[in-house]
Image (cartoon, rainbow, N blue to C red):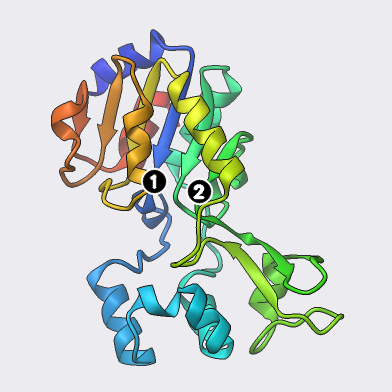
Amino acid sequence: MTEKLKDMIAKSGRIVFLGGAGVSTESGIPDFRSENGIFKAIRDYGHPPEELLSHSFFMQRPDTFFRYYRELLMVSGVKPNPAHYALAKLEAEGKLTAVVTQNIDGLHQMAGSKNVYELHGSIQRNHCMRCGRFYDGDFVAKTDGIPYCDCGGIIKPDVVLYEECLDHDTLRGAITHIMGADMLLVGGTSLQVYPAAGLIDYYCGDKLVLINKSSTAYDSHAHLVIHDSIGKVLGEVIGI
């Protein structure tokens, strides 16, 4: 399987990567949709994660929102894994044109990727809801309670919460790159979260590769399916 993937990559010049939570969990970032994540949310906060991370909950109970947000999403000390570094290497070699990710941790950029479309935003970017002033992730992480701007406005993370729409420009850029790709590499995602999962339908080429530990609904449509760790596979194939 890995030899076939190497050959497909060698014959491609416009690769796009579409990735999900599985890429980040290999760096030690928990997936709140996992059984443990849901259990912890209900046990410690009395609400499912989909409610805690919703726009309405943020507006109504920002104090509880930020407690959960810091504990679950702002994990400290994490580093990119071989999957992140492999993709950055492919981009540096001129073979990969874009990374499209559902993750909000910024690990792709930390590994060296430049052209990253963050569908669900990033914990590294935050803005005051009143004046629009920018604050980095460290400011929010180190603030107790609700983070406030000097102007008095609440600082909101630039992450797409439940009940919110994806950024139009980010979505359009991701679709444009996928439509122009000669190879679509999909990894670390079960392809169950929409609209992100639906982006795969914009690919019309003949090199659709799915790398995920479990099967997905798109396995039968792919030209190559590898049920294994995304970091292990890409690390071996790209030589990380």
- In terms of secondary structure, where does tag 1 sit? helix
Residue on which the image places disc 2: 119
Name the quarter where the C terminus is drawn: top left
Task: Classify 10 Å Cα crowding around label 1: few (below 14), some (14-19), many (20 and above).
Answer: many
Front residue of 203/104: it is: 203
Mark 1 touching mark 2, by CB under 8 A? Answer: yes
Return the x and y of residue 127 as percentages of the image width and height. Answer: 73, 66
**Location of mark 1 (residue):** 196
Residue kind at label 1, given as amino acid type: Ala
Residue 7 appears in which quarter of the rendering? top left
Image position, residue 55 (x, y; %) = 51, 74
What residue is at 55 percent from the left and 68 percent from the top? Answer: 76
Using the image as rendered, state which of residue 224 and residue 231 is in the foreground.
224
Name the quadrant of the N terminus: top left
Specify which label sits upstream in the sequence, 1 or 2: 2
**Crowding near the residue tagged with mark 2, few <14, some 14–19, many ≥20 C-alpha atoms within 10 Å:** many
